[in-house]
Image (cartoon, helix red, strand yellow):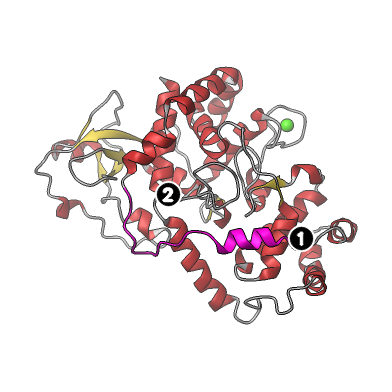
């Protein structure tokens, strides 16, 4: 999910909210540089207007606590349907007040528009795949070596990909956000502008509480991303795993649990064992890009996917003169798309279906490329 929009202190924040840590359809998401966030916000706004027209008031009318409490009480049937005990709701609803700061943060997200220019990747790469982040990644990699090896053996998700996600999301656990998730999500749901997005996350957080996750753990970014992997609550419920054998999926305090949960996310997003995320390539000056344009019309994240070429095998790419420029290699039959993030004549990458799994975590080319490149650097 990374666009500082989620309230943590990193400079790349997950748009994770949008399910966007949701396997296939659930992305965890974050996307500042690609402005995906902006597109998503537009789409969500449209969704709210269209879908929420009859069920969600655009903005609470009186803005007072009475109205807020009435909204919370209205959630009880939905919570009960999810098996959440009334007692759990009684205990938490009585403590809640709206958090105006969260509303401000939600309304102050930078705009940009669906047609705003996409910046170059190289400055982003230099900032996010820097020596400090690589070195800390190597420390985390060595510190978790035994468990990473075991998780990779079980899931096929490479050790370094788990570490790179950990590094990108929270700088290896150094910032995970300190907003009270239930208060933040209740505020955003009640306020109503993006209720279709936030109310399910509020209910998922209440479910976590009902399942026994301590309230003290339920903190994160202002928009609901939580723990070392910055999962949305709905994602936590779907993929969080116990990695250290104590029976709890503690993604806030256990690196083992966080790494196992990240791997499980990718398993559910369709990660293919033995396949790299992609590889840097050199592109011949005369490549006719009109012949490699994708003809599809992406249903999700069009601004991200529209930058990719059509799928071709590595053998076909090689015949066009597109060749791996470093040590990495992909087999002749592997399918890949070409991405030239800064335009022709600059860096270029051939990307496999596993790159799409990283986009599922956070639908941003900058995010996914940075995760792949950080993973490669950590493993070196
Ligand atoms: Ca555990």
Which is more N-terminal, label 1 or label 2? 1
Up-down relation of residue 43 to residue 54 (above or below): above
Q: Is residue 66 left or right of residue 243?
A: right
Is the CB of the residue bearing disc 1 within 8 angstroms of ligand 1?
A: no
**Residue drawn 38% across the image and 41% down it:** 124
Badge 2 vs badge 1, beta-carbon distance below 8 Å: no
For marks 2 and 1, give the CA distance: 32 Å
Q: Quadrant of residue 294?
A: bottom left
Where ligand 1 lies, by quadrant?
A: top right
Q: Is residue 25 left or right of residue 323?
A: right
Up-down relation of residue 254 to residue 313 (above or below): above
Q: Is most of the magenta stretch helix, strand or loop?
A: loop
Label 2 secondary element: loop
**Residue drawn 42% across the image and 29% down it:** 130
In this view of the protein, can residue 5 be seen by the observer?
yes
Q: Is residue 259 magenta?
A: no
Up-down relation of residue 61 to residue 378 (above or below): below
Find disc 1 in the rendering and name its residue. Answer: 82
Q: Residue reaching furthest bottom?
A: 54
Start and end of the magenta stretch? 99-119
Q: Is residue 110 magenta?
A: yes
For marks 2 and 1, give the one nearer the viewer.
2
In this view of the protein, can residue 277 be seen by the observer?
no
Q: Position of residue 155 (x, y in %)?
A: 54, 32
Find disc 2 in the rendering and name its residue. Answer: 364
Is the CB of the residue bearing disc 2 within 8 angstroms of ligand 1?
A: no
């Amino acid at each position: 999910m990374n666009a500082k929009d989620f309230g943590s202190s990193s400079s790349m924040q997950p748009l994770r909210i949008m399910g966007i840590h949701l396997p296939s359809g659930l992305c965890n998401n974050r996307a500042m540089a690609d402005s995906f966030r902006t597109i998503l916000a537009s789409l969500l706004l449209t969704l709210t207007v269209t879908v929420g027209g009859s069920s969600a008031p655009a903005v609470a009318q009186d803005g007072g606590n009475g109205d807020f409490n009435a909204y919370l009480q209205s959630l009880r049937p939905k919570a009960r349907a999810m098996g959440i005990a009334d007692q759990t709701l009684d205990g938490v609803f009585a403590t809640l007040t709206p958090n105006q700061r969260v509303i401000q943060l939600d309304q102050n997200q930078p705009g940009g528009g669906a047609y705003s220019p996409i910046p170059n990747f190289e400055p982003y790469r230099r900032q996010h795949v820097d020596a400090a982040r690589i070195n800390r990644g190597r420390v985390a990699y060595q510190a978790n070596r035994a468990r990473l090896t075991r998780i990779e053996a079980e899931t096929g998700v490479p050790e370094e990909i788990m570490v790179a996600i950990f590094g990108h999301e929270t700088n290896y656990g150094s910032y995970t956000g300190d907003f009270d998730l239930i208060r933040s999500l209740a505020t955003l749901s009640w306020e109503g502008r993006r209720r279709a997005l936030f109310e399910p996350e509020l209910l998922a957080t209440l479910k976590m509480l009902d399942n026994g996750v301590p309230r003290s753990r339920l903190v994160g970014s202002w928009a609901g991303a939580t723990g070392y992997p910055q999962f949305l609550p709905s994602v936590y419920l779907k993929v969080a795993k116990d990695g250290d054998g104590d029976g709890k999926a503690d993604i806030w305090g256990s690196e083992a649990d966080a790494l196992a949960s990240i791997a499980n996310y990718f398993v559910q997003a369709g990660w293919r064992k033995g396949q790299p995320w992609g590889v840097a390539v050199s592109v011949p000056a005369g490549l006719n890009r009109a012949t490699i344009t994708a003809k599809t019309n992406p249903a999700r994240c069009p601004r991200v996917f529209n930058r990719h070429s059509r799928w071709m095998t590595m053998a076909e790419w090689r015949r066009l003169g597109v060749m791996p420029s470093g040590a990495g290699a992909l087999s002749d039959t592997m399918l890949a798309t070409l991405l030239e993030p800064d335009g022709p004549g600059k860096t270029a990458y051939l990307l496999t279906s596993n790159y799409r799994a990283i986009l599922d975590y956070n639908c941003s080319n900058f995010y996914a490329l940075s995760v792949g490149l950080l993973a490669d650097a950590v493993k070196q």
